[in-house]
Image: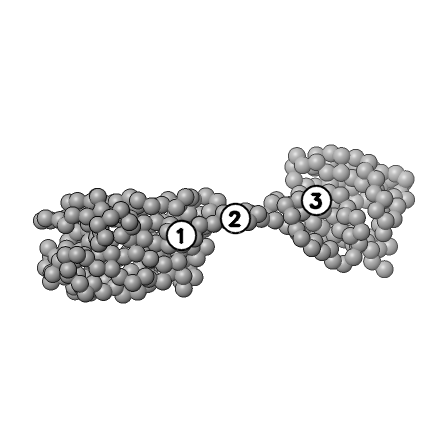
Amino acid sequence: PLQSQCFFTDPPLAAATNTSYPIPAAGTNDAGNYLVIVTNIAGSATSAPAALTVLAAPPTTNDVIVGWDVSAQAGFGPSPFAPTTNASNLTITGLTRGAGLWTAGSAAARAWGGNGFDSPSAASAVISNDFVTFSVMANSGYQVSFTAVTRFDYRRSASGPTNGVLQFQIDGGSFTDVTPLSYPSSSSSGAALAAIDLSSFATLQNVGAGTNVTFRIVNYSATSTNGTWYIYDNANSSALDFAVQGSVTVSAPPAPPATVPVLTNAALKGVAFQFQILGTAGSNYVVQVSTNLTETNWVPILTNPAPFPMIPMSPPNRT
């Protein structure tokens, strides 16, 4: 017959002699390494450690994670243009004009943009670098998910681009189309696009720390090289004129290193039983003995940092 004894980190668990060990409501004190030793008259077998990590409810933001207010901009605005709203624990590369764009002529006030959007298609605009980019990266220990572009106010001149496409890229991968863009209005009062969903893209959810997500607005079909396009302050206020909503959460920490020891080189030497204990170097381990595995009368006989030397124990009637 087999007897089981479950262990938590070092000590055996009281009344944990069944083939399973339930923890009805795990708390942070339950985090650590678990293992089971199964024994019968022929010997024993020790399981690999199972690491249990218990996480507290992580702090979360589910709001605008990056946004720009262009109300104070003039002369087409700087490139890159840092965000005016930036969620904590994110690194942002601001709005940046592609190398194919320029800033010639008179610029609209309360606007950020440029001209040079006269490529005939999105593909040719990409080749000509006629686009605007910005990037978002979660800092160490955090991850970011993208829900939607919730604000997209624009203005274009009569000869400015009428079409575009929103794309994203994960690190150095290829760009993925999110949605085509249309700029039907050339009113000097500006106009607004409807919200753009990002939540359906699995690769934009739970993006880990250090992974750079680049968004690209590719505009094209301007009828003149001097046709202008801007992110524009329609409301003439300090409200955001371009905004991305999402969440920033704590990343799950890596599992703790296994510190459960391994018994090796077991042998009988005369009337003594000797063995060696290997584990995480420097960690303390306790050698315990018992005369009956079905009971909990374990008695510690030695505490030492790993690795243990060969340890003789006698008399040989101990388990």
Disc 2 to disc 3, C-alpha distance? 25 Å
From the image, tell me which residue sits under label 1: 63
Image point (81%, 38%), residue name = 300
Residue 210 is at least partly visible in this image:
no
Q: Is residue 153 above or below residue 256?
A: below
Image position of 50 (left or right of 198): right
Image position of 66 (left or right of 280): left
Residue 7 in the image, given as x and y percentages of width and height: 74, 48
Disc 3 to disc 1, C-alpha distance? 41 Å
Q: Nearer the viewer, residue 144 or 290?
A: 144
Q: Nearer the viewer, residue 31 or 152?
A: 152
Q: Quadrant of residue 217?
A: bottom left
Residue 40 in the image, given as x and y percentages of width and height: 84, 55
Image point (76%, 38%), residue name = 286
From the image, tell me which residue sits under label 2: 58
Q: Residues within 10 Å of mark 3 (few under 14, many from 20)?
A: many
User: Under tag 3, what secondary structure?
Assistant: loop
Q: Residues within 10 Å of mark 1 (few under 14, many from 20)?
A: some
* Lower position in the chain sequence, tag 2 or tag 1: 2
User: What mark, if any, has residue 9 been given in the picture?
Assistant: 3
Q: Nearer the viewer, residue 253 or 72?
A: 72
Disc 2 to disc 1, C-alpha distance? 16 Å
Q: Residues within 10 Å of mark 2 (few under 14, many from 20)?
A: few
Type of amino acid at the residue the image marks with label 1: Asp
Residue 255 is at least partly visible in this image:
yes
Type of amino acid at the residue the image marks with label 2: Pro
Mark nearest the camera among 3 and 1 is 1
Mark nearest the camera among 2 and 1 is 1
Residue 243 in the image, given as x and y percentages of width and height: 32, 53
User: Under tag 2, what secondary structure?
Assistant: loop
